[in-house]
Amino acid sequence: MNIALLLEMAADGAGDRVALGSHSGGFSYPQLLRLARNTADWLASHEGERAALLDGNSPAVPMLLFGAALAGRQFAPVSYRLPAGQLRAVIGRLAPGVLVPGMNVVLPEPLPAGLTAWRREEFLAAASQPLEGGTLSQAGPDDVAVLLFTSGTSGEPKAAVLRHRQLVSYIIGSVEFLSADPDEAALVSVPPYHIAGISAILSSVYAGRRIVQLEAFDPESWVRLVNDERVTHAMVVPTMLTRIVDYLVASGQRVTSLRHLSYGGGQMPAPTIETALGLLPHVDFVNAYGLTETSSTIAVLDPADHRKFASSEDPCERRRLGSVGRPLPSVQIEIRGPDGTPVGPGVSGEVFVRGDQVAGEYIDGSCRDGDGWFATRDAGYLDEAGYLFLHGRLDDVIVRGGENLSPAEIEDVLLAHPAVRDVAVIGLPDAEWGEQVVAVVVPADGAAADARALQDWARDRLRSSRTPSRVEFVPSLPYNETGKLLRRRLRDEFSDVS
Amino acid sequence: MQTADTTDLRPGSRWRSAVCESEVIVVRAPAAPVLLCIGGAPVLAAGSDPVAGGAPDSDLAEGTLLGKRYADEISGLQLLCTKSGAGTITVAGRRAAIMAPRKLPASD
């Protein structure tokens, strides 16, 4: 069980399809496999267990991902957008091995001992042909396939470990081999150092779906590439979809080839998904919930659910449009209360997950319990029909007077106010209630926002305990590069002023 | 000749037919010892040489299909075919059944 098996099977079963790149002139599966084998030879000619990448999307990503698997090395894609201090710390943990930076990436000097850097173009040139003499030892099922430095919305980035058996279990448990129609193409615009950037390559290869890569996301390039390459499938994080929707509305452009759009990687604002559903009626929407530590998706809200719930008169069904759907058949999800015991439907707690794809491991040790359960640190509940609702990170849930409040629920209500462009709801210490609800608002262009008006708006639509006791106005909110809101930074900033 | 028993059929272990081109990988281990055959002959560890001049039994030659999952309900064994061939997969003499395709939407 090695992820390279997925590519070998595709090369065997779909030799005539384009695997990667443009419809005309892209690489076929056998060609991609040959490049991965060349990459493995190249890696074997260097010392060290790590094959690190410091770059956006390019053919180097699948080549190093599969090449490392064939050479028994660990693929470690790293964000080139990390602040200099964090980048230095992460690179310090990559040795020994090779590092492939993009052409314009500035490397910290000096590199740690045992780490040698080869620019992307140098690597691609070296791996364009086979090397003689290297002996390969393919990775086994328990070997590490990928190291991902998780986004670190709090503190130092953690190195999550994904083993071959976990990634392969995820793919063969959720994707049917060569199930894609020959004309399907998936646009990968999520960066390679995001779990969805890795799983998109693995699942597209196994499904036989052509991969089109966008080196770095911007909405205009995304729309242009969808149209130029007749892209049918794409996965986006919430900030990407917000920007794509804004761009489509402003430019009047359309994406007629697109059939299937999945979104995940953070809380999707309700107004964004509602606008997107209206703007793209021909597109199947999928909401996917997953974590780096679970080899990507563990729950999905599928296209049929989206259509049914969006048009339902039943408030209970309509609410499910804001859920992340139901667990994959190959995983179990359980909600546990503060005392660690499972709770029933409708009761909030921490989301636990178990299954063959669940890694739950960092470079310094496993975080799964003896029965294989992994604590996600996400707060949420399952409804009677098994739909999973998330409240955000456990650390972000606001506990006011003993009541657990979901920032996302309050944010969705405030976002629907015309004077609000963006909003974050955070809990700050309060002498009387333990925590108070504070809304940090980015006003809409030209709008005159007023704290009292927003509080009244929230009180009319939510219980009074959920009404912000304070409203702060800011020009923008702090997000990390894959669209995760840095709530801790806001808490630090506003707990000093009151 | 190395044959398969319960200890061998670990998830992730790979096997080839002794008498055709078929190769499989174990997705789920069996609950109890079982004999895994393809084309009527016990499987070999992947990478071994097939039996010279071997051929599947004529009544166990329906073939295997690349990318299909095969299951034996009684033992719980699940396999994924990683290379197709001419033989039929049997588990303790029972024909393994092709599992229904998944109907999950693409999510990444």
Image (cartoon, rainbow, N blue to C red):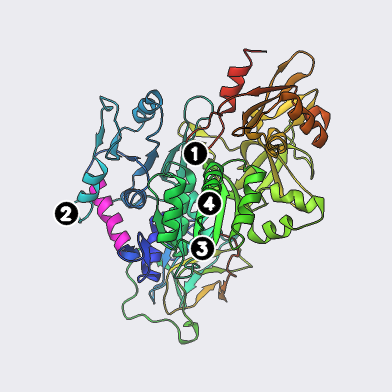
- Give the left or right position of residue A391, taking residue A298 as reference: right
Under circle 4, the secondary element is helix
User: For the residues marked 3 and 1, what is the alpha-carbon distance in whole angstroms?
Assistant: 26 Å
Badge 3: residue crowd in 10 Å (few <14, some 14–19, many ≥20): some
Q: Nearer the viewer, mark 3 or mark 4?
A: 4
User: For the residues marked 2 and 1, what is the alpha-carbon distance in whole angstroms?
Assistant: 40 Å
Badge 2: residue crowd in 10 Å (few <14, some 14–19, many ≥20): few
Respond whether the residues carrying marks 2 and 1 are from the same subunit.
yes
Q: Are marks 2 and 3 in contact (CB under 8 Å)?
A: no
Tell me the residue that label 2 is attached to: A132
Tell me the residue that label 1 is attached to: A482
Respond whether the residues carrying marks 3 and 4 are from the same subunit.
yes
Q: Position of residue A117 (x, y in %)?
A: 25, 36
Badge 1: residue crowd in 10 Å (few <14, some 14–19, many ≥20): some
Residue B1 against residue B57 in the figure, above or below: above
Q: Which residues are magenta?
A: A31-45
Mark 4 belongs to which subunit? A
Q: Would you identify the image quadrant in which residue A45 lies?
A: top left
Q: Earlier in the sequence, mark 1 or mark 4?
A: 4
Tell me the residue that label 4 is attached to: A248
- Tag 3: residue type? Thr
User: For the residues marked 3 and 4, what is the alpha-carbon distance in whole angstroms?
Assistant: 12 Å
Q: Nearer the viewer, mark 3 or mark 1?
A: 3
User: For the residues marked 2 and 4, what is the alpha-carbon distance in whole angstroms?
Assistant: 51 Å
Q: Are marks 2 and 1 in contact (CB under 8 Å)?
A: no
